[in-house]
Image (tube, rainbow, N blue to C red):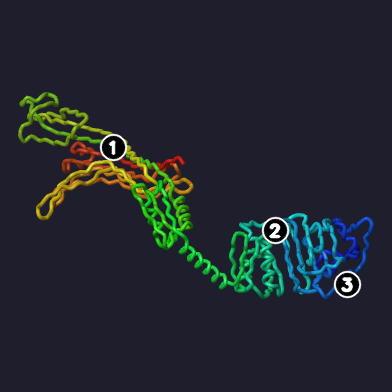
Amino acid sequence: MVLVFVESDEPGDAGQTAAVTTTEPEQMAAEPEPVAATEPAPERRAAPQEPAKVVTSAAAPNLDEPSVTDINFTRLPDDVALLRLQLTDQSIEHEARVRGNRLELTLYDTEISDDLLYVLDVSQFATPIAHIETFREGDDAVITITGKDDFRHQLEQIDDSLNLKFSKPIEVVENDGSQRPISLNFQNVPVRQLLQILANENDLNLVASESVTGNITLRLENVPWQRALNTILRVKGLSSRMDSNILIVAPADELAEREAQELEARQRLSQLAPLESTYIQINYAKAADIAAILRTESSDLLSERGAVTVDERTNTLLVRDTPRQIEEVEDMVEVLDVAVKQVVIEARMVTVRDNISDELGINWGITNPSMGGPDFFGSGTENSGDFNVNLPVSNPAATIGFQVAKLADGRLLDLELSALERENKGEVIASPRITTANQKKAYIEQGTEIPYVESASSGATSVQFKKAVLGLEVTPQITPDNRVIMDLVITQNTRGETVSTPTGPAVSIDTQEIGTQVLVENGETIVLGGIYQQQILNDITKVPILGDIPYVGVLFRNDSQIHEKRELLIFVTPRIVMTKP
């Protein structure tokens, strides 16, 4: 056995090259053992009885048959390993298979001389490769490269030289095998051989049509596997189909024609298949609704000879069709016939009122004591035509009166003050609640219908009604993550004032309404909206001219102030009703 190690003289090389040849093939009968390689030159361990010999050349190859003439291992910059195989024929068919950190390169119908059969340990080189082994397998030559860990490889053929480069893997986020990067560099390589390489890269089986012929030249660097395949197929006018882990490649026209034939064959088979009848019990859905889906032209669940009948009394489907179509119908029913979730929607309408009113009134009068009136302000009677200013408070909370002066004729000038301060606070809570199925509209109302008379132009009258109700209308939709989308309309109407119209009195309705769509978590309370109203009324009743006199004018007028606040808040809480499976 002979090993020769030489220094690389190629520009850019790291200066370490192992060129390996062997002699004395009878020594290969024993199981070869890996040998350790040192940085200056790897050592080769031979059998104990036959010490290794080092020479500078290998035996002359047989050029009449495809064969491997030389093997070189070189360490390149960036810890890249280069394994170069020198061939006698550039058309040698080859295949590379990767299994974990092991690559097996097979050269079909290729001779490899006994000089090149060896096991080489290169683990001490700063490359991803641990050792290289060459052997025969029938008429094929096989080179096995084992890495220290996972590695990336690039296979390229330049004329009669086959080059394998190994580098450390690049960490990429891969969604699937189709995004795995691959590098290819081939000149005039058969398309079938290239497709086999791509299939091996993704651990796929390959079936190629006889029409897949011709050669191709390409160079791709770090291209996703699927894109590389699509590029090759597009250039050669081919198409592919995946059947589990089998990659089928054929001309596009041929594949389309084959699929059309298969479809036609299935249709003919369906027309010849015997018909069967089956009963399908529908539990939650309506049998008529599912039958309508089956009868649509776009469903393709029933064949041309198939039929479906509904028994509404038992909510059952009677399906007559081929066994395959019946199985598809049963699968569809299993998906659609499920219990529908329900939602309880509770709304709260809170109305808060705060009313404060202040009134101050005055009353002037003249009384005649001779008419029996009291000496102090009291219940005396007035003579006709006596002066009187009457601006009191209606329903006063308190009054106070006194005599201001005594006139020359003995009459008394009286003054009466009246005042009222009123405060009203109220809170009204309306809480309608309703339960409905998913995506089903529901509503609830509570209130009164107010009658009123409506007159027509002919003079005829009729009684009409207006609703003054508290209402909730909702359409819920349960999302897959158990949240609730709600289309809501909430109204709170109350009776307003009675107004006069040309045809008679009519009743007005005070309306509070909100309509919206919201997305709410299950059991969460959300504020839909609110209305805040503030009303300030100032009412002054006075004696002309006298009521406008500064300071004194207050004695000749009635002042009334009303402050009213009203606030409306609307809350909604949906709760999904969990049903037992």
Q: Nearer the viewer, residue 323 or 22?
A: 323
Kindly state the secondary structure of the residue where label 3 is placed. loop
Q: Name which of mark 1 and mark 2 comes first in the sequence.
A: 2
Kindly state the secondary structure of the residue where label 2 is placed. loop
Q: How far separated are the C-alphas under marks 3 and 2?
A: 41 Å
Q: How far separated are the C-alphas under marks 3 and 1?
A: 117 Å
Report which residue position mark 1 lands on. 355
Q: Nearer the viewer, residue 401 or 360?
A: 360
Judge left or right: residue 130 versus residue 494: right
Q: Tell me if residue 58 comes above or below residue 202 in the rendering.
A: below
Q: Nearer the viewer, mark 1 or mark 2?
A: 2
State if disc 2 and disc 1 touch (CB < 8 Å): no
Q: Nearer the viewer, mark 3 or mark 1?
A: 3
Q: Name which of mark 3 and mark 2 comes first in the sequence.
A: 3
Q: Residues within 10 Å of mark 1 (few under 14, many from 20)?
A: some
Q: Nearer the viewer, residue 212 or 133?
A: 212
State if disc 2 and disc 3 touch (CB < 8 Å): no
Kindly identify the amino acid type of the residue bearing the numbered disc 3: Ala
Report which residue position mark 3 lands on. 60
Q: Tell me if residue 483 comes above or below residue 210 in the rendering.
A: above
State if disc 1 and disc 3 touch (CB < 8 Å): no
x and y percent of residue 376 in the render?
14, 24
Q: Residues within 10 Å of mark 2 (few under 14, many from 20)?
A: few
* Quadrant (top left, top right, bottom left, bottom right) of the N terminus: bottom right
Q: How far separated are the C-alphas under marks 1 and 2?
A: 76 Å
Kindly identify the amino acid type of the residue bearing the numbered disc 2: Ile
Report which residue position mark 2 lands on. 170
Q: Residues within 10 Å of mark 3 (few under 14, many from 20)?
A: few
